[in-house]
């Protein structure tokens, strides 16, 4: 028997048991059977190994061989990642299609990164410089939008003895040499890193800068900070996927990684068709020039679905280490948890709540805690933000995946099926959602804008909460039985919901809303409310307020006032003051 081998003894779906194992270690990537299917060792006992296979095991037979590679399951990190679409174990789907057709066949092996393409390398590091984790050796223009910084791998430290001259190189060519304590290491333009191992960083920073998404209900009421973590739970049809599409297109991250984990094939097809056609609004270049897609649909092997999350976040950490602000959209973590449950069942592990493995919470914690805002060195900082969609059966937020996720996130964007049914999008529930980043990012708003964001946000939330209480009374006695001051609260809440929180992804002016426009809109609504309160206190009936022409102008401001012409808010404010002054004079 060779140095790293074993023999298949038992097959249980994607889980196999091998015996007479030699030279294979826990966590090793192995190749299984005559077709050499990609797999990973997940348990060892004496000369027996339990192995999970990342491909379809149909046709595999006991007695076939297991071959060890001596390496853990890892991804290749280097030029050529950007604009690609990978499966859950980093195989480029476009190359698989060219080699095997429209369906992924078993045993297909394609390199994650192109070995033949030449990149124009520009050196930055110099001979005798000290090299350590994430030191930049040079740069490559990966796409028109992204400069790829060639990094020293995290496990290398020493003195640089050679740096290649500027020129054309493949990713396998040596572009630097580093003298470590033990030997001289030759560094090509790429390196491998285990997907389950967190990449090191110098230190964490406070998440004090908002990740602006252009969605008013998120940025203004339930903000997410750069380097923060958020969850989007919601039942079928509430708009999780479309909301993540909007976040990917409009958020102020520099790199987008979209992980389609166990979603239906038609939804993933929509992503694969739409993303290449999307235009980055900041550069007018295709959005794919700064996007990486990881596609693992529900009909793909369940074990590859489990690894897709780790593949995506490891690639995200790599670009973070270059100094970029990265946002990862994982859709959805529920399908990932279901993969854990299926594998756990085949391993005959003791189930916990609803059949999920007992380690579900720890796996979720390991995933979300890899996000953060980091100090790379004295001159550079970067961030990795995580937004995970959760698909609770029947929209039940009390199920295990949602409940465990809430323990490890600080931003909860709960989707409401009633809002979605009423065609109110984004269907974010302002009663179920919350953000713990409000106090962290308040200073950023105050420094960049003269208006107090914290006060405006508090005032709007109070009106929405008052309206919710009043609706209970309205259901019993009708709105006409309420005092005019309370009816004004209902009217202002209607303006907040329809003119501010509701947003159309199909409107050129309303699909994205800048921070300045959000403040302008909130100021308008609250100024209208404050002036109206004063007039009602003078005895004016509520209908004199609701019938003002300016109300319709407020309703239309989200589509009428562009992001780059905020002076129009001054004109709208003058209109409010003029019409309110006329009423005030009448009831003086």
Image (cartoon, rainbow, N blue to C red):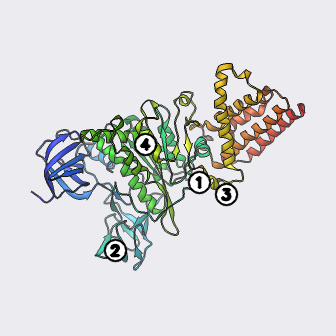
At which x and y percent is residue 443? 64, 55
The residue nearer to you, when weighing 335 against 185, is 335
Quadrant assignment for the C terminus: top right
Q: Would residue 437 appear left or right of 168 to someone viewing this image?
A: right
- Residue shown at the point (17%, 41%) measured from the top left: 11
* Cα distance between the residues tagged 3 and 2: 46 Å
* Cα distance between the residues tagged 3 and 4: 36 Å
Q: Secondary structure at mark 1?
A: helix
* Cα distance between the residues tagged 1 and 4: 24 Å
Q: Would residue 549 appear left or right of 584 to someone viewing this image?
A: left
- Quadrant of the rendered structure where residue 298 is? top left
Q: Which residue is mark 2?
A: 177
Q: Earlier in the sequence, mark 3 or mark 4?
A: 4
Q: Are marks 3 and 1 in contact (CB under 8 Å)?
A: no
Q: Secondary structure at mark 3?
A: helix
* Cα distance between the residues tagged 3 and 1: 13 Å
At which x and y percent is residue 107? 22, 47
Q: Secondary structure at mark 4?
A: helix
Q: Residue furthest left?
A: 1
Q: Earlier in the sequence, mark 1 or mark 4?
A: 4
Q: Which residue is mark 4?
A: 404
Q: Secondary structure at mark 2?
A: strand
Q: Which residue is mark 3?
A: 447
Q: Are marks 2 and 1 in contact (CB under 8 Å)?
A: no
Number of numbered markers: 4
Q: Which residue is mark 1?
A: 440
The residue nearer to you, when weighing 530 against 236, is 530
């Amino acid at each position: 028997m060779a140095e790293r081998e074993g023999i298949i003894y038992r097959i249980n779906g994607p889980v196999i048991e091998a015996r007479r194992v030699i030279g294979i270690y826990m966590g090793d990537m192995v190749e299984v059977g005559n077709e050499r299917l990609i797999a990973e060792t997940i348990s060892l006992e004496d000369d027996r190994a339990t192995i999970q296979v990342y491909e379809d095991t149909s046709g595999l037979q006991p007695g076939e061989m297991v071959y060890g590679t001596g390496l853990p399951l890892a991804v290749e990190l280097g030029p050529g990642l950007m604009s690609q679409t990978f499966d859950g174990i980093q195989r480029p789907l476009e190359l698989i299609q060219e080699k095997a057709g429209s369906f992924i066949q078993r045993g297909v092996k394609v390199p994650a990164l192109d070995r033949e393409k030449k990149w124009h390398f520009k050196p930055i590091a110099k001979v005798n410089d000290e090299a350590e984790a994430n030191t930049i050796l040079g740069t490559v223009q990966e796409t028109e939008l992204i400069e790829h910084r060639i990094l020293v791998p995290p496990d290398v430290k020493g003195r640089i003895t050679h740096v290649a001259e500027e020129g054309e190189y493949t990713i396998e060519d040596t572009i630097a040499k580093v003298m470590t304590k033990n030997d001289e290491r030759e560094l090509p333009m790429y390196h491998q890193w285990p997907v389950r191992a967190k990449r090191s960083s110098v230190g964490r920073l406070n998440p004090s800068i908002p990740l602006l998404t252009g969605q008013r209900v998120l940025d203004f009421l339930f903000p997410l900070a750069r380097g923060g973590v958020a969850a989007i739970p919601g039942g079928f049809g509430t708009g999780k996927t479309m909301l993540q599409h909007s976040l990917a297109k409009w958020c102020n991250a520099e790199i987008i990684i979209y992980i389609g984990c166990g979603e239906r094939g038609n939804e993933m097809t929509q992503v694969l068709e739409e993303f290449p056609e999307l235009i980055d609004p900041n550069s007018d270049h295709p959005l794919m020039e700064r996007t990486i897609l990881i596609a693992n649909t529900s009909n793909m092997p369940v074990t590859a679905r489990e690894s897709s999350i780790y593949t995506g976040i490891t690639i995200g950490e790599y670009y973070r280490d270059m100094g970029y602000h990265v946002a990862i959209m994982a859709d959805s973590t529920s399908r990932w948890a279901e993969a854990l449950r299926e594998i756990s069942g085949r391993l005959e592990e003791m189930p916990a709540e609803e059949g999920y493995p007992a380690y579900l919470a720890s796996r979720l914690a390991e995933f979300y805690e890899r996000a953060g805002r980091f100090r790379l060195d004295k001159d550079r900082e970067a961030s990795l933000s995580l937004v995970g969609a959760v698909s609770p059966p029947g929209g039940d937020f009390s199920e295990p995946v949602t409940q465990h996720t809430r323990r490890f996130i600080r931003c909860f964007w709960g989707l409401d099926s009633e809002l979605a049914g009423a065609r109110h999008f984004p269907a974010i529930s302002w009663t179920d959602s919350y953000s713990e980043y409000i106090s962290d990012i308040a200073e950023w708003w105050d420094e960049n804008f003269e208006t107090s964001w914290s006060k405006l946000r508090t005032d709007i939330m109070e009106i929405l909460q008052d309206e919710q209480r009043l609706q209970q009374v309205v259901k019993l006695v009708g709105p006409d039985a309420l005092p005019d001051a309370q009816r004004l609260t209902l009217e202002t809440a209607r303006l907040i919901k329809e003119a501010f929180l509701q947003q159309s992804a199909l409107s050129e002016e309303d699909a994205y809303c800048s921070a300045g426009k959000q403040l302008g809109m909130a100021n308008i609504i609250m100024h209208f409310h404050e002036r109206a309160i004063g007039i009602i206190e003078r005895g004016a009936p509520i209908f004199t307020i609701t019938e003002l022409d300016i109300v319709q102008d407020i309703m239309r401001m989200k589509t009428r006032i562009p992001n780059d012409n905020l002076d129009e808010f001054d004109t709208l404010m003058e209109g409010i003051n003029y019409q309110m002054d006329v009423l005030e004079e009448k009831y003086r």
